[in-house]
Amino acid sequence: MTSPLTALLPATERALLHRVATAQSEGRAPSLVAGVAREGRLVWSGARPSADEDRTVDTQYRIGSITKTFTAVLVMRLRDEGLLDLGDPLEKHLPDTGVGEVTIAQLLGHTAGLSAESPSPWWERTSGALRPELADVLGERTRMHPVGRRHHYSNTGYTALGALVAAVRGDSWENILRNEILRPLALDRTSADPHGPRAEGWAVHPWADVLLPEPCEDLGLMGPAGRLWSTVGDLCRFAHFLAEGDDRVLGAASVREMRTPSAPAGAGEWDGAYGLGVQIVRNGGRTLVGHTGSLPGFVAGLWVSVEDGVAAAVLANATSGPLPSPTAADLVRIVAEAEPRIPEPWQPRPEVDRELLALTGPWYWGTQSFGLKLLPGRDVELQPLRGGGRGSRFVAGSDGTWTGQDGYFAGETLTVVRREDGSVRHLDLGSFVFTREPYEPDAGVPGGVDSEGWRGLRP
């Protein structure tokens, strides 16, 4: 039997090619390349014009702000190693910036209130040598908004994060990136500087079919905000890492934390939210995680649907016109809808934990019914049995409690409360008491239960 990962159906491939060809034609891009991965494996790539043999999955394009996601991974690694806390003020690790009271988490989520851009001249088209110090990047007016009050996308904030990584590690951002992300994940065609084959950056005249070459500047300190070059092949592999994690770089729990919204996007920016270095959008009923990017001469888009196991990257060499973000989202949708993920076969658990098994089934918070279900390992899920309500997945801890992972009870502790004889009295979840029967008399319901019990109501 053919593996479901070896190839896409011809009809799916044609739909992908049509979408890419439409994006390149309508966007008037000198070239546009795209790749689609399923379960981390590249299963399709396309390029327009298709006759250009150099436009392959191995051709480097500048990816702009997708670089920010790589920088965020480096920061999360420092957190996981205990070298910093996301709640730390920047000043603790990088003194004398003038913005030291903002936290690392606020910088990651663009809620630090810093300026979007560095002072003039426009940093994307000028040499980084014009901004040799972090103070030159941040400028005199560093605050655009109150700290922590709103999402305000900030290139300067990610410049500060790159400087933070370099200061804590004692090495350059480029070297740290290469050693801690690119080499372990085998992203051999991702680099701070281009290595052929590479695409040339162009501006396309808005009213005529003519081109103007764009300059390619060394961004200096602004590099962590947008310097990288990459390929659709490398970006699709990186998307799989954002979905699954890799213990050589960052574990699954930490990448899941990156994918958790930390702030809603500002009005008019995009329909979604921002996590820790990643954009999060809802598109066609599915959640996509990734980032967009642009620099003069280039635009880029990268999205992955964790639920579907499908990722797509789109790169073009035009300053404006092509729309890589919606194109990449459409490529994910085409594959996910035409060839949905094949579920893993159900298998029984290898052994029975009878104490855990006894906790499964219906529970009541007051009169609202919930069902507790066992998940792999010792994790559990508690969901309402009727209508909407407060449900969550819970991860087991070493102390016999569980911690909520999502929904209303994210971060809250679920505890089994027992009687003196060892029998289960109730479940305590953030002070909410869950009992086996609605308002069970001896199960510790706060406020007690009327001694006469349930009754009818006579007219």
Image (cartoon, rainbow, N blue to C red):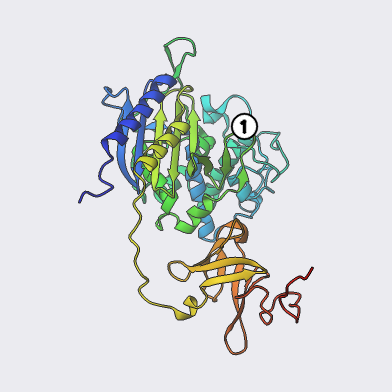
In this view, the residue in front, 50 or 79, is: 50
x then y, percent, for residue 362: 55, 70
What residue is drawn where x is 61% and y is 59%? 390
Measured from the top left, where is residue 413 in percent x and y?
Answer: 61, 68
Task: Confirm whether residue 85 shows in the render.
Answer: no
Quarter where residue 121 is shown? top right
Residue picked out by circle 1: 268
Location of residue 77 in the rendering, given as x and y in whole percent from the top left corner: 49, 54
Point out the image quarter for the C terminus: bottom right
User: Which residue is pictured at 67% across the width and 47% down the height?
Assistant: 102
Tell me the element at label 1.
loop
**Foreground pick, 42 / 140:** 42
Q: Residue furthest front?
A: 459
Q: Is residue 35 above or below residue 428?
A: above
Question: In the image, is residue 359 above or below residue 145?
Answer: below
Seen at 56% across and 58% down, the residue is: 406
Report the amino acid beneath label 1: Gly
420 versus 245 height, above or below: below
What residue occupies the far bottom of the structure in this picture? 421
Q: Residues within 10 Å of mark 1 (few under 14, many from 20)?
A: few
